[in-house]
Image (cartoon, rainbow, N blue to C red):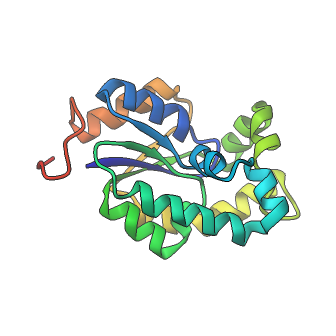
Amino acid sequence: MNVVLIGYRGTGKSSVGRLLARRWDCPFVDLDDEIERRAGMTIAEIFAAEGEPGFRRRESTVVQDVSGRDRHVIATGGGAVVDTDNRSALTHCGRVVWLKASPQSIHVRMSADAATSARRPNLTASGGLEEIERVLGTRTPIYDAAADLTIDTEGKSPQDVADAIVAQLGWDTLPAGGETA
């Protein structure tokens, strides 16, 4: 059994994922980090060299590999579950938790994180809050359909979000794949 964190960038998937993995004493995988490690390039460099289709192909390969693991906390990239095959693999490998925030909060969080803009390119020509609202409008029904559990991260620290996930799942430890949770 895995816990898969989904949601728009800036919702805390990586920070919360690390906290959950530490709490449950299990491995943590950040899909974006794994894609960069395998490619030997940043996400921005992959987008520049191969475009979004090239990045999404790489992402799908990593999703298929990671979804075969057990007892991992997995933080996806914001668009990973848009692809039907990725969504299917991730929803079948564990419990999917959607970390949700308002477009305004996401914009503030992303603006405060210099690494986000340097590492990840804009997805539309508009960028900024307008891009977040547009992309989130498209992805929200997908996130909602994929999620077993939704956690609103608005005004919460990563620790508060991790605690809420643990409380709602009711797990002191992350169960193995064959265990009933």
Choose top left, top right, bottom left or bottom right for residue 14: top right
Front residue (pair 104, 89): 89
Residue furthest right in the image = 125
Choose top left, top right, bottom left or bottom right for residue 133: bottom right
At x 58%, y 53%, the residue is 77
Above or below, comparing residue 179 to residue 87 in the picture = above
Q: Is residue 129 visible?
A: no
Residue furthest bottom in the image = 84
Image coordinates of residue 29 in percent, x first then y, are 47, 42
- Left or right position of 167 against 54: left
Above or below, comparing residue 161 to residue 65 in the picture = above
Image coordinates of residue 44 in percent, x first then y, are 79, 52
Front residue (pair 89, 158): 89
Q: Is residue 31 visible?
A: yes
Front residue (pair 96, 174): 174
At x 33%, y 51%, the residue is 69
Tally of marks: 0
At x 80%, y 43%, the residue is 117
At x 44%, y 32%, the residue is 161
- Left or right position of 64 against 95: right
Image coordinates of residue 175 in percent, x first then y, are 19, 41
- Left or right position of 16 against 95: right
